[in-house]
Structure formats: structure tokens, C-alpha cells
Amino acid sequence: MSREEELLTEIRDLLQVMAEPAIAQRDAKLRATLRGIMGGSEKRSRAIQLMDGSRTQTEIAKESGYDRGDVSKLVKALSTATLVSIREGAPKLLISVPSQFFDKDYRDEQ
């Protein structure tokens, strides 16, 4: 990665941190829906975190330890709620969430 790319990445990361409160307010209903679908399941949480558009459902199941059929049902539920898009079998989460969104302590605070 070039120095310019590193700087741009750092700037993007800082802007995301600064914008998080506004994004959280804008996406409150979607995040609540995501949290409802995710529930308290650690495996479901890991599976959702892996939905970045680079992995198929089979790969997500392997990496998360979540059953392949259950990943399919999860993707369908998220798709119905318009929380993921699917291209070439690779689901991608459509809303941004902070990395701690999936932590149990963070979920309990919300």
C-alpha cells in the first residue's frame, strides 16, 4: 500500500468514527432489526460479521461454525429485511455498524 493510500485509509477511519453518532441515529431502526435477527447467538453474530461480499454462504458457514442451512435462513431473513444484498452467492451487509456492535457487552448496553 502506498503512503497516499495509507493516509486516505486513516482519514476515512477517522471520519467514520466522527460520523458514527449520526449514522447510528439514521440507521437506528435497521440496526434494531439487525439486532433482533442476530439475537444473542455468537455463531449468528460471527456469520453476519463475515458478510462483506467476499465470501459465499458456504464459506461463511465454515468460518463461523454456523450450520450451512442456518446461514441460508439467516441470509434470507436479512435479505427480507433489506439488510443484505447478494451477488454471486456472496451476501454483503448493507448498513454500517461499529465493530463493537457484535460484542456481547455492547449489545447488552443497547
Image: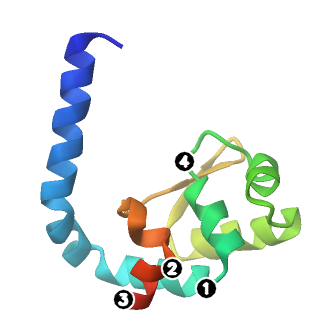
4 or 1: mark nearer the eye: 1
Please give left or right for residue 18 compared with residue 92 in the image: left
Counting residues from the N terminus, which is met first, the one under dot 1 or under dot 3?
1
Q: Nearer the viewer, residue 64 or 30?
A: 64
Residue type for callout 2:
Lys
| Mark-to-mark CA distance, 3 and 2 | 9 Å
Counting residues from the N terminus, which is met first, the one under dot 2 or under dot 1?
1
Query: Where, quadrant-wise, is the C terminus in this rendering?
Result: bottom left
Which residue is the site of mark 1? 40
Residue type for callout 1:
Gly
Q: Nearer the viewer, residue 40 or 93?
A: 40
| Mark-to-mark CA distance, 1 and 3 | 13 Å
Q: How dense is the environment of label 1, judged by Cα within 10 Å: few (below 14), some, or many (20 and up)?
A: some
Identify the mark at residue 109; answer none if there is no mark. 3
2 or 4: mark nearer the eye: 2
2 or 1: mark nearer the eye: 2
Q: SS at mark 4?
A: loop
Please give left or right for residue 25 compared with residue 33 in the image: left
